[in-house]
Amino acid sequence: MEQPNRRKFLIIAGAGAGAAAVGVAAAKTGIANPDTPSAGSAAALPADAGPLVAYVEDAGSGRVSVMTGDAETVVHDPDLVARLSRAATGRTA
Amino acid sequence: MSSHREAPEISKDPVADNTDVYAFVSPDRPDTVTLIANFIPLQLPYGGPNFNEFGDDVRYAIHVSNAGDARADVTYQFRFTTVVRNKDTFLYNTGPIEKISSKNWNRPQFCTVTRVDRRGRSTVLSRNLAVPPVNVGIRSTPRYDATFTAAATHRLPGGRMFFAGQRAESFHVDLGSVFDLGALRPFQAAHLIPSANAVGVNGTQGLNVHTIAIQVPKADLTRTGKLPTDVMDPAAVIGVYASASRQKSRVLNPDTGTPAGFGPYVQVSRLANPLFNEVIVPMAAKDRWNATDPRDDKEFARYVTKPELAGLLPVLYPGVFPKLAAYTKPRADLAAILLTGIPAGVVPSFQNFTGPVQADLLRLNLAIPPTPAPKVLGLIAGDPAGFPNGRRLLDDVVTIELRAVAGATIPLVDPTFTPDAAAAAVTDGTDNTNAGFTDHFPYVGAPAGGFQTLPGTPAA
């Protein structure tokens, strides 16, 4: 750490900040592509399906964090991440 | 301030902002410990119509570590539920709130207290514990202290006591002065930008906070499960910190205008020793510090052993701290006080060492009894029942930490060092000017009333 002095003390320094992207979904919104094998139909939803949040910090990692209630499940599913990413840009196919 | 608005992110989230933590052997029940965590800083008593309240979406907690690894061995969690009784009025109260269960109070809160052990096993101690209203004024909350304090003090299983609600701010500091380039009014004639010396002004005067207080048997917190009696026994020492956590994801519902939370709880505020994040941790690291557990504080240790404030004092007060300015060794005294506790052999017949793991914890030696004649400067004034052995409501932590940073405690670990004369005299010159403390649980003074409290005097 630098020793402060009178001149330096009057100099104000700033710092940068990072940023992250958030993807939000609900089970009932049907983001999944019905043409892909892993996609589910409404009839295939779990009986207790509720609102959830899917968060993809780094699409390249293929990981999606799924949060519902006070739980979080991290899934490695590049296909799901790809479909979410396409959905985020308005392209569902 | 102690930890009021001390980091960029938490300053935007006052409901979760932990302002002060206290831990002391209860003076009237010395077989118990009182743990207090205050939240929601700088409350104007007349800050309606939506007065300050605990957050239903915040998980408040007080943690106790007793095994020497800075992990929480006992955690008390506090969750609040708010009820709106009358959805057709804008009023906080539709008439005098003559008792805590009054139907005139339109927005009561209730608390659930849960104890969690080291393995994560939870035990709900009690549910739906009534929280008092804020102190609105003589018409809305008449005879506030008599009406609400005892009614909101609850007995929990296992000999525990609990209180949560608005109280007077206990922490005192000259906010306006210290944030103005580190001025201390009693010494400001010696400041780099001098003005005439003056008496200190308590910047928290007339302000309230929200207090969570729990009193528990000592044996509930020790690693042995026994009542400690030997001051030099390592098992007599506990480390305490408080936290507030929010769910990882928050989604605003445009239909209701309210948020919904998703995912696990993530710590957004924590506090143990006063002023740690405030004046030790650099601004760019403060948010991360709030999200970090104490057991991972090693990465912040360099800010303790070479504190920025110790470098600033000789600059701000030219010629006043020449010995401090010349001291180049790592500040082992501050590392002991803040990060490990003071080991045996440093202060005669005293220790509050929790082991080598560096962690910001408020360390309390439970075998040291409360004193009937406490000194506000605590251990540095020869009173081992006070800060930094835990923290009592009356401890003048600003002066204690100012003097420590100024070098007054260096000789404890480095007898070759003689402090500057100013190190024993420096202070912000404030005292508690809010409601006095009581001699029984919850000890914190009653909150200032909205009607009764006058706004401050603007000046430019």
Image: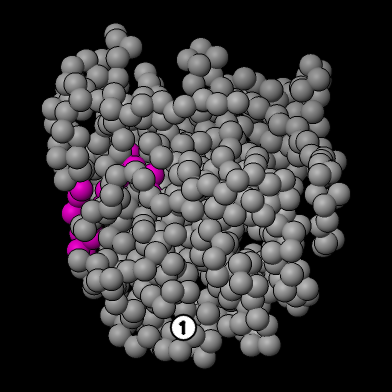
- Total number of numbered labels? 1
Residue at x-position 34% and y-position 44%: B434
Residue at x-position 45% and y-position 51%: B430
Q: Which residue occupies the foreground of this view, B309 or B107?
A: B309
| Residue B307 falls left or right of residue B187 | right
B175 vs B374: above or below: above
Magenta-colored stretch includes residue A41: no
A3 vs B37: above or below: below
Magenta-colored stretch includes residue B157: yes
Q: Amino acid at mark 1?
A: Gln
Pointer 1 residue: B351
Q: Which residues are magenta?
A: B153-170
B248 vs B364: above or below: above
Residue lying farthest to the front in this orientation: B196
Q: Which residue occupies the foreground of this view, B445 or B239?
A: B445
Q: Which residue occupies the foreground of this view, B241 or B247?
A: B241
Q: Which residue occupies the foreground of this view, B332 or A86?
A: B332
Q: Position of residue B407 (x, y in %)?
A: 63, 72
Image quarter where the C terminus of chain B lies is top right
Q: Disc 1 on helix, strand or loop?
A: loop
Q: Quadrant of residue A44?
A: top right
Residue B273 seen from this side: no
Q: Position of residue B7 (x, y in %)?
A: 63, 44
| Residue B72 falls left or right of residue B109 | right
Q: Position of residue B205 (x, y in %)?
A: 41, 40
Residue at x-position 56% and y-position 55%: B275
Q: Quadrant of residue B56?
A: top left
Q: Quadrant of residue B422?
A: bottom right
Decide: few, some or many residues near mark 1? Use Cα within 10 Å; few <14, some 14-19, many ≥20.
many
